[in-house]
Image: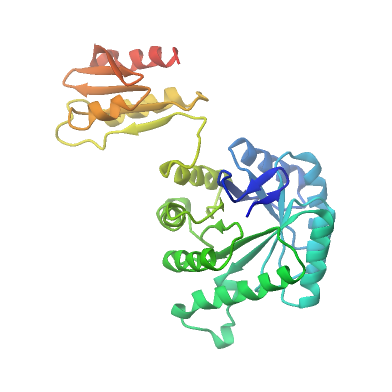
């Protein structure tokens, strides 16, 4: 099934959409707009904005008018905020079954969303659906999340609302994988992937890549958000990197492959690679560039690259478009690579 979020199509054969969330006070309209624009410039397809108060939904409506990327209203506890956000131009609203539970409230939101032709994400978070006074064991929480999702979806289907995107998130990598497998088996709606709280950027990369990457490799997932504590642009970058590693993202930037180095290397490959990366920083083309340190894997990697160097002692073999072009002294490698980049 395909769901439209503004001009963005999620699901089916459409590209997986990277999204993020604004992390500034929504009522600070100018600052929020700047952050949304930074995210869009980084390649973010959808941006979610928190709207906990009436003042926030009022600001949200003004932000919608000032940006080009579709905005999602993040709604918790208050059905009134959902209605206000929909009427204020949200392309999608996110509802949490853990804190919007009354049937009449949900139906009001569904009918308003239908009238405005927008999508709704049903976002089940493990942390928010648990009853801490009668908590269930971790091994039972996958079933708990699936049960809450099924109850919500049944109500949407009873109102003949099909513009649904589903998500079930946990801070636990294995449980996130398990619950999304179960949801993909049970439903035919697009799925939003992510961990609830992945951590600081330096701690979040591996669990995010494992959880999201595992599911994407199994064909599960249509849009992703990497949750990092910090600059949301880093969320977009890491999300794109996960997609690129699986061949699911058409990058407009160069991709640099670097030899991990070992005792066979006769030049400082890491130093050269860092200098090459600086050369690539201002290039907006999908080039494959490789910096390799020896003849074991080097020639093969260079043959697959648009531009590459395979280093030997005191010299390097330059490859362009997969073919060996020249042999240059070590001290001339960076200069030669820069000249070749200018020809692409």
Quarter holding the N terminus is bottom right
Residue in the image at 70% along x and 49% along y: 5
Q: Quadrant of residue 190?
A: bottom right
- Examine the rendered structure and indicate whether residue 130 appears above or below residue 296: below
Residue in the image at 50% along x and 25% along y: 285
The location of residue 44, given as percent across then percent down, is: 60, 42
Q: How is the image coloured?
A: rainbow
- Examine the rendered structure and indicate whether residue 321 appears above or below residue 252: above
The location of residue 126, given as percent across then percent down, is: 55, 72
The location of residue 89, given as percent across then percent down, is: 81, 50
Residue in the image at 79% along x and 59% along y: 113
Is residue 268 in view from this perspective?
A: no
Residue in the image at 52% along x and 58% along y: 194
Query: Closer to the camera, 7 or 42?
Result: 7
Q: Is 303 on the left-hand or right-hand side of 123?
A: left
Query: Closer to the camera, 244 or 257?
Result: 244
The location of residue 157, given as percent across then percent down, is: 71, 68
Q: Is 143 on the left-hand or right-hand side of 173?
A: right
Is residue 82 in view from this perspective?
A: yes
Q: Is 172 on the left-hand or right-hand side of 146?
A: left
Total tally of numbered discs in the picture: 0
Quarter holding the C terminus is top left
């Amino acid at each position: 099934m395909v769901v439209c979020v503004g001009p963005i199509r999620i699901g089916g054969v459409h590209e997986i959409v990277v999204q993020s969330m604004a992390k500034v006070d929504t009522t600070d309209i100018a600052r929020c707009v700047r952050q949304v624009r930074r995210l869009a410039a980084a390649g973010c397809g959808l941006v979610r904005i928190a709207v906990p108060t009436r003042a926030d939904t009022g600001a949200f409506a003004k932000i919608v008018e000032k940006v080009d990327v579709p905005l999602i209203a993040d709604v918790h506890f208050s059905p009134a905020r959902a209605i206000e956000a929909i009427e204020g131009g949200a392309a999608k609203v996110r509802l949490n079954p853990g804190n919007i539970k009354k049937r009449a409230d949900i139906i009001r939101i569904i009918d308003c969303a239908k009238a405005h032709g927008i999508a709704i994400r049903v976002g089940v978070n493990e942390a928010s659906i648990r009853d801490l006074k009668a908590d269930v064991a971790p091994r039972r929480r996958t079933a708990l999340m699936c049960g809450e999702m099924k109850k919500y979806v049944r109500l949407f289907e009873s109102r003949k609302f099909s513009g649904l995107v589903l998500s079930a998130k946990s801070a636990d990598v294995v449980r996130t994988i398990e619950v999304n497998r179960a949801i993909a088996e049970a439903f035919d709606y697009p799925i939003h992937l992510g961990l609830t709280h992945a951590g600081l950027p330096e701690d979040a990369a591996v669990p995010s890549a494992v959880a999201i990457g595992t599911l994407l490799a199994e064909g599960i997932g249509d849009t992703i958000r990497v949750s990092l504590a910090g600059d949301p642009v880093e969320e977009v970058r890491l999300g794109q990197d996960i997609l690129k590693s699986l061949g699911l993202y058409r990058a407009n930037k160069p991709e640099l492959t670097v030899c991990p180095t070992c005792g066979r290397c006769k030049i400082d490959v890491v130093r050269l690679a860092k200098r090459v990366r600086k050369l690539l920083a201002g290039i907006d083309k999908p080039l494959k560039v490789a910096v390799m340190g020896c003849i074991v894997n080097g020639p093969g990697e260079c043959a697959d690259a648009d531009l590459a160097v395979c280093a030997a002692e005191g010299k390097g073999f330059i490859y362009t478009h997969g073919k060996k072009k020249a042999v240059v002294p070590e001290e001339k490698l960076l200069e030669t690579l820069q000249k070749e980049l200018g020809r692409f």
